[in-house]
Image (tube, helix red, strand yellow):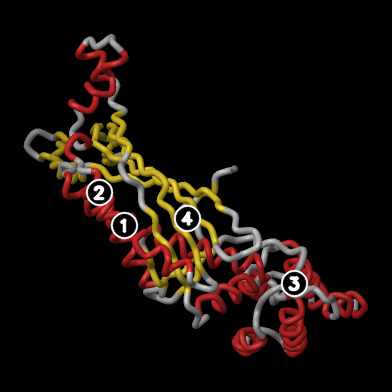
Amino acid sequence: MLLIAGFFLLSPVKWGCSVSECWQWGILLQGRVTKKGKIFIRILIVFCEKFRCHFEITIFVFMKMSGKRPVVLLSVLLLSALVMPCRAQEKKLAKEFVKQEVQRNVLLLQPSFVYKTSLKTYILDSLGIKDKTLFDSVLMANSVILQYVDDSLFIANYMAGLKKELKRFRFSVYDENRTADFMAANSNAYIVNVAQIELEEDLFPYRDATVYENIEYYHDHLLNSLTVDSWFEISEVNTEKNERQVYFASDAIMDDIHGEFTYDVFSDEIKYFYTIDSLTVKDVYVFAYQLGRTYAAYTFDLIMNKYISDHLPKGKKAKHYLRFDPVHRKIFQADDDRFVPLDK
């Protein structure tokens, strides 16, 4: 047993948590275990420092098995570190990146127009349109939102949100008119090119439902929706590789519905009442600004995760994609809220 413990504790592999965190948890746990258990807590402290393991999961297992035999407990702890993913070292690098007092520069490039597509092809059948050359113009003329969206205003709001949020992340932002000034930057310089934006108008099927006395009641709606698809080309300049990667992001906005099921005591029926706050062009412009801010955060996260990958020990790859919340100063794991890299 001691040979096994010694083998793991002296292992050169280093993963992720600090000694201070181990001591804090150790102090909290000592009141829950026996005298022999305290010895294993001290082993755990050294263990976490050596292995940089996923500390929260290890502690959870430890607490659940605190009544088991020490030899079984230690075996489980060692096994948990081997089979469970660890992100503490990645978080440590992320915090290191966030705290850096360095000047980061970004050149923003914007598209000259916005692609617009109406997916409401049922209109063609209802109007009896057979000539394919007329499809796009007929769909646009019968769109609820698309035909009224001004390209220049949409792009202006989109880029304004992008620029403002990048500055919040302490980037020095340059536009095309200041390209020469940007190129004079020695390091930490990036080009963010909003290569293409496409707006797609469609109908979104939405069901409002409730259960009353084990019976489901529902009401179906078709809501007007507008999807914004964006393609970014992002590259770091003044580097050996200087590779330009394409990234994709998509978000949607739609009619806002407020529905309510109520029981009518007089008719002994469930009735449904609703109101729809229809999507407007103003809503679309506000949404464009919000998207710009969101994608500025995605840009920061992208650069932060590249920093993490570049500074992990040789041969190791990042297992998690992290995000940074500048308001609460928190680092957390991303889900779908990130850029999607497209294969070259």
Would you name the residue on which mark 4 appears?
Answer: 338
Res. 246 in view: yes
Look at label 4 and name its amino acid. Answer: Arg
Which sits earlier in the primary sequence, circle 4 or circle 2? 2
Q: Identify which amino acid the numbered label 2 is placed on.
A: Phe
Crowding near the residue tagged with mark 3, few <14, some 14–19, many ≥20 C-alpha atoms within 10 Å: many
Q: Distance between the residues labelled 2 and 3?
A: 55 Å
Q: The disc labelled 1 sits on which kind of residue?
A: Met
Q: Nearer the viewer, mark 3 or mark 1?
A: 1
Tag on residue 159? 1
Residue 293 visible? The answer is: no
Could you say which is closer to the camera, residue 13 or residue 2?
A: 13
The nearer-to-camera label among 4 and 2 is 2
**Among the two numbered marks 2 and 3 on one chain, the one whose residue lies closer to the N terminus:** 3
The residue that appears at 11% across and 39% down in the rendered structure is 264
Question: Which numbered disc covers residue 154?
Answer: 2
Q: Where is residue 248 in the image (x, y as percent from the top left)?
A: 47, 47
On the image, the x and y values in percent for residue 205 come to 30, 33
